[in-house]
Amino acid sequence: MPDLLSLVVQQTINGVYLGCLYVMVALGLTLIYGVMNQINFAHADFVTVGAFVALFTMTRLATKMLGMPEVAGYLLSIVFALGAGALLGLAVNAAVFAPLRDRGDELRPLIATIGVSVLLENGQLALFGPIPYQFDSPLAKETLRFGKIFFSLQNVLVVAVSAAAVAALYAFLKFTFLGKALRAVSQDRETSGLMGINQSFLIGLTIVIASALAGMGGALLGPGLVLDPFAGATVIVKAFAIVIIGGFGNLAGTILAGILVGIIEAFTIQYLGAGLIDLVVFVLLLTMLVVKPTGLIAERREENV
Amino acid sequence: MAALLEVEGIELAYGEVAACREIAFAVAEGEIVTLIGANGAGKTTTLRGVAGAMLPRKGRIAFMGQDITRLPPHERTLAGIALVPEGRRVFPFLTVRENLEMGGYKFRRDAAKVRGLIERMMDMFPRLRERHDQRAGTLSGGEQQMLALSRALMSEPKLLCLDEPSLGLAPLVVQEIFKSIRAINAAGTSVLLVEQNAQYALATAARGYVMQTGAIVASGACADLRLDERIKEAYLGRK
């Protein structure tokens, strides 16, 4: 295989891998926006919590206490991070978001998400300290090689888990009664109430799904992060950019934008250097805002959620 | 006749501004009752109050003897009230079938029942069967009205509230919609009809209330209202 071609294939693979990580984080943001027209500023911290839960599940619980092999321990940690994200979403919704929403205020829940973010960051700072943790995925060491192209089992796992999560979300929204009701709420909240749909329940469910994805995203991302209590913030800026490029609240657009940004990032690293990634991504974001502020595929007047 | 719906002195407001004051009316079981009046008289607001989209700041609403004044809309649907909102408000990106399923949300744990109800709606409006897999946003206005009506019926309501079902529709389609409304009523569902087209409304309903600037100013049997000189002049466009 000629060098250029294998280079392009290699960087595309790297890009898709990165993109899948971003999609896991961005999906929750866009889902919450699509259903309740609200930005969740605490989303990054749900990712961080997921990463810490995964780290401790793998290093303390699975391998030390249960004596599981490392790989099995990491897989278990992904499940635990998913569950931890869901539980955290459930708790935060019940304690903060739902009561504020019931008072019919739009601004207060938004500001509350910033409050939850500060709370989670400082809570983790108190628990884990400011020094970054080492989070090594046992799968990152296992590399597969095809000619000049190689990738790790971690890459394969991330892409497979992300694809499975997207497929599950799609099936939920398309084929289940609750999923269709969620789309109904996102399209016309008042009318959905008149249909007998309990919006508070569905909004809570949306937050739980988004948080579960964020938690799982944390477990997948963790090994690539400098894992401290503020680790999520480094990804969330890019996730916001992806959500905007994809068209706020548009799931398909977000997935497409996530993969696209991942690929652009991989090629930027190859040709321009890693230091320019943010520059390139945000030039792209600004260009999108000027040229096509409704997002990548919004022009087809696509459904959001 | 037993009163199905009793509205007693409700006041509905948008923010600080009261849109309706001292509204009192009743719908008996099996009856078609209409609220007529000019644009901005408060008909839609009153209907939204009945369906729970707005909560009154004064007064009381009773349905089948139960106080429902503070019930949120989704619980009123469970109690047996359904609303066909003004402008139809179908879910544009859901298919016709999915829209109907949403109307039957309260039966979601009984898939066979929901399927059966959808079949009945499609028997009533065969156009919906033809377009069952199409997004509701792509339907014509008349088809959307049929869908909105069927969607409301999916919850098997005891009281069907209709807000301007004739709005923006061709006369032939309006006739078809009103024929269905009468058929639905004949099958046992009470109807509360808000309509600007007073002629149709008074011909369809048994009793009517006339609204003006947020209050009920006249009421009676539709046969009498049609003969009332003031109503003729104001709403029927003839002397």
Image (cartoon, coloured by chain):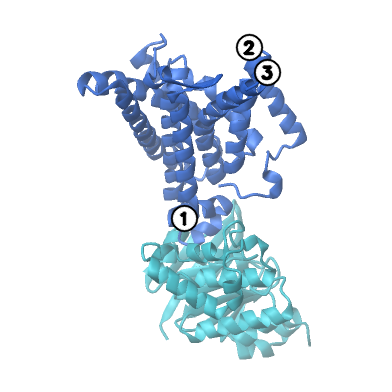
Chain colours: A blue, B cyan
Same subunit: marks 3 and 2: yes
Alpha-carbon span between mark 3 and mark 1: 40 Å
**Crowding near the residue tagged with mark 2, few <14, some 14–19, many ≥20 C-alpha atoms within 10 Å:** few
**Compared to B11, does B123 lie above or below?**
below
Mark 2 highlights which residue?
Answer: A275
Percent across and percent down for residue B92 are: 62, 58
The residue shown at (72%, 32%) is A288
| Dot 3 or dot 1, earlier in sequence | 1
The amino acid at mark 3 is Leu
- The three-letter amino acid code for the residue at tag 2 is Gly
Dot 3 crowding, Cα within 10 Å, few <14, some 14–19, many 20+ = few
Residue that carries the numbered disc 1 in the rendered image: A175
Res. A198 image quadrant: bottom left
Residue at image coords 42%, 45%: A205
> Sequence order check: which comes first, mark 1 or mark 2?
1
Provide residue A4's location: percent of width, then percent of height.
67, 20
**Residue B164 versus residue B111: which sits nearer the camera?**
B111
Q: Position of residue B145 (x, y in %)?
A: 63, 71
